[in-house]
Image: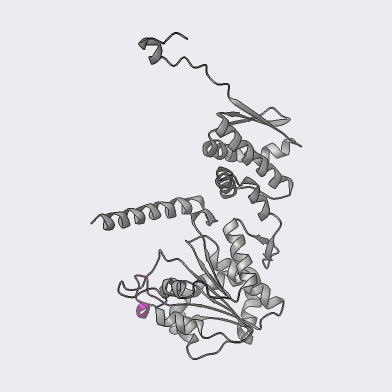
């Protein structure tokens, strides 16, 4: 074969590749509307996340583009259509999670989330795991006596724990639900808040109240509180007690001191279960105090009966901006660690 001259070498004479093409049959036009979303909002997200071009010819979805992009989009659209055909809805977070799994070669795993109903709210809404991390968390709650769940805001740590607590209470597996938080002052002074002690600590406990209202309804919740079957209180109220046959949830545990965490973990008695949730990136303790949550994770690693679950930004089920914010802070924190190492 004759050698190419310099002019020919500078030119890209490789024949252009034909774009890859995939086609998925539709069962109805309604599928197109639900898949593409209002004003094609879902379609725009899928195309943006995969880099493929997606259209419909009426009877099918046609996907074209570079092989990698088209194959990725095909896997995502195929699974999203399966979700729709099982009577579920799709939204931005579910689409992006499907794309993340498909990029890892695990697109089919999203279908594992469809059939497991964790609980029902007071209004009959079904609560399901939305990510594989949440599914692992629920599995740990079912199998272990003590569960630590660490992850960023919006991953459902507290909400799912409350759901399982209410379920255990309704099934008479426990006699009481106890929810607690350390009343750490995050930039505000507790003493300057109006009212008595209960009024002062209520703002710290509000997320726990909200979750209980969701599953029990306001009236039923207050009746159970009056009976002593539900207790929502600051962590300091736990000192000196032994808690039998109770489902005990410690929320915002990153703000416990090591002494508080040890005190809490030695309160539960026969027939009780303990869930500890927290976000180690949001510690409000003074810098010289080590978080009791971090210390407990180190001390209790590998202990029989204790499970440690770590959720990430991929498990965030709030608004998509929460995911972006968490990732940005993670990058910034990684940069600070790098700078310190360099120094």
Magenta stretch, main secondary structure, is loop
What residue lies at 49% left-to-right and 91% top-to-bottom? Answer: 240
165 to 16, vertically: above or below: below
For residue 46, above or below residue 161: above
Seen in the picture, residue 318 relative to 240 is either above or below; the reply is: above
- Residue in view at x 67 percent, y 50 percent: 111
For the record, the magenta segment spans 182-192
From the viewer's side, name the closer residue of 98 and 37: 98
**Residue 238 placed where, x, y %?**
50, 86
- Does the stretch in magenta take in 189? yes
Position of residue 1 in the picture relative to residue 138 (left or right)? left
- Where's residue 179, x and y in %? 54, 77
Q: In front: 167, or 230?
A: 167
Quadrant (top left/top right/bottom left/bottom right) for the C terminus: bottom left
- Report the side of 258 relative to 169 (left or right): left
Tell me which colouring the rendered structure shows: one colour
| Residue 308 visible, this orientation | yes
In this rendering, would 320 be left or right of 23? Answer: left
**Residue 217 appears anywhere in the view:** no
- Residue 92 in picture, x, y percent from top left: 57, 47
Residue 188's image quarter?
A: bottom left
Residue placed farthest to the bottom in the image? 240
Total labels: the figure holds 0
- In this view, the residue farthest toward the left is 343
Q: Which of the 4 image quadrants contains residue 315?
A: bottom right
Instruction: Report if residue 203 lies within the magenta region.
Output: no
Residue at 61% x, 56% y: name it.
130
């Amino acid at each position: 074969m004759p050698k190419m001259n310099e002019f020919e070498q500078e030119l890209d004479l490789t024949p252009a590749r034909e774009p890859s093409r995939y086609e998925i049959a539709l069962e109805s036009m309604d599928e197109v509307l639900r898949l593409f979303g209002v004003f094609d909002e879902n379609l725009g997200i899928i195309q943006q996340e995969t880099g493929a071009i997606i259209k419909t010819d009426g009877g099918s979805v046609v996907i074209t583009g570079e092989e990698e992009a088209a194959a990725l989009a095909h896997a995502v659209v195929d699974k999203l259509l399966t979700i729709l055909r099982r009577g579920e809805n799709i939204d931005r977070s579910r689409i992006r999670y499907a794309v993340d799994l498909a990029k890892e070669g695990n697109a089919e795993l999203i279908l594992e989330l469809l059939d497991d109903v964790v609980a029902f709210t007071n209004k009959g809404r079904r609560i399901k795991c939305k990510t594989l991390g949440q599914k692992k968390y629920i599995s740990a709650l079912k199998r272990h006596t003590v569960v630590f769940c660490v992850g960023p805001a919006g991953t459902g740590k507290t909400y799912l724990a409350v759901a399982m607590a209410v379920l255990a209470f309704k099934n008479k597996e426990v006699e009481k639900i106890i929810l607690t938080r350390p009343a750490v002052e995050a930039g505000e002074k507790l003493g300057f808040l109006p009212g008595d002690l209960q009024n002062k600590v209520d703002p710290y406990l509000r997320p726990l109240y909200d979750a209980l209202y969701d599953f029990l309804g306001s009236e039923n919740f207050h009746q159970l509180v009056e009976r002593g079957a539900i207790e929502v209180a600051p962590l300091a109220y736990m000192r000196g007690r032994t808690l039998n046959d109770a489902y005990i949830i410690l929320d915002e545990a990153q703000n416990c001191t090591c002494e508080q965490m040890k005190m809490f973990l030695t309160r539960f008695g026969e027939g009780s279960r303990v869930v500890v949730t927290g976000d180690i990136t949001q510690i409000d303790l003074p810098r010289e105090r080590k978080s009791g949550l971090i210390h407990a994770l180190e001390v209790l690693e590998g202990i029989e009966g204790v499970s440690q679950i770590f959720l990430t930004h991929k498990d965030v089920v709030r608004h998509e901006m929460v995911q972006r914010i968490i990732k940005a802070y993670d990058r910034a924190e990684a940069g600070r660690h790098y700078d310190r190492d360099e120094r």
